[in-house]
Amino acid sequence: MSGTLSTLAQPSRHLEEIKKSRFLALAAPVASTEQALAFLREMNDPAATHNCWAWRIGLDYRFNDDGEPGGTAGRPILQAIEGQGIDRVMVVVTRWYGGIKLGAGGLMRAYGGTAAECLRRAERVPIVAMARLAVHCDFAELALLKARLKELQAEIEHESFGTDGVELQLRVPENHAGEAQLRISDISRGRSKVKRLD
């Protein structure tokens, strides 16, 4: 896999006909096992001969041959994902059998090739490592703090108001985490303490 991982900007599809069988690859960005399985349920075509699939999310991955001979469908789809340095993605390749047997090698090329072409054509976005931070600040500092952290592409995951101020949980790109901590300290004149959550 290449140094910088990417994921898909949006779902992608690619259709190929190989010896009268139709192969439709559908790929989508996913952030969790639940999202991957939901995409599979949505794209699964009960009228098709096979709905083979693979997904990778970080170090976690799964694949399934859905009745094709072992190792001829799911694993080649996973290899297509890995070969292109893509993460957080689910690929389903649906086959409608056309009457001509492809053999193990032919199936591997058909499933892997259709998946790879679908991913190759898809628009990608780089995956940015994120840090999670928790901070407590005074009400008077909240607006300025939010504005200054937004400049660093920080996203507020959660905020709760208490009697003595506001608790924030933030996600900020890892390469801006140090700068975010400095800004919080400057704005609060050292009163707000930042805690890393990851």
Image (cartoon, helix red, strand yellow):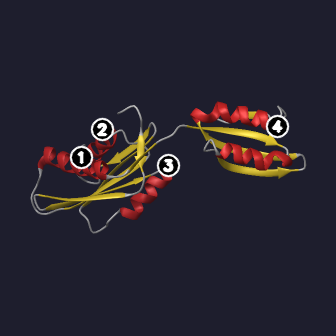
Give the residue type at disc 2: Gly
Mark 4 or mark 3, which is nearer to you?
Answer: 4
Q: Earlier in the sequence, mark 1 or mark 3?
A: 3
| Residue 196 appears in the rendering | no
Distance of label 2 from label 3 (alpha carbons): 19 Å
In-image side of 162 versus 114 (left or right) = right
What residue lies at 78% left-to-right and 34% top-to-bottom?
186
Q: Disc 3 residue type?
A: Ala
Residue where numbered disc 2 is placed? 83
Label 1: state its secondary structure.
helix
Neighbor class of circle 2 (other Cα within 10 Å; few <14, some 14-19, many 20+) is few
Circle 3 sits on which residue? 31
Earlier sequence position, callout 1 versus callout 4? 1
Q: Position of residue 77 (x, y in %)?
A: 29, 46
Do callouts 2 and 1 mark residues in contact (Cβ within 8 Å)? Answer: no
Q: Is residue 19 left or right of residue 116?
A: left
User: Badge 1 local density, few (<14 within 10 Å), some, or many (20+)?
Assistant: many
Q: To which residue does mark 1 refer?
A: 112
Residue where numbered disc 4 is placed: 188
Measured as percent of width and height from the top left, residue 18 is found at: 13, 57
Frontmost residue, 112 versus 6: 6
Locate residue 114 relative to residue 89 in the image: left or right: left
Residue 189 in picture, x, y percent from top left: 83, 33
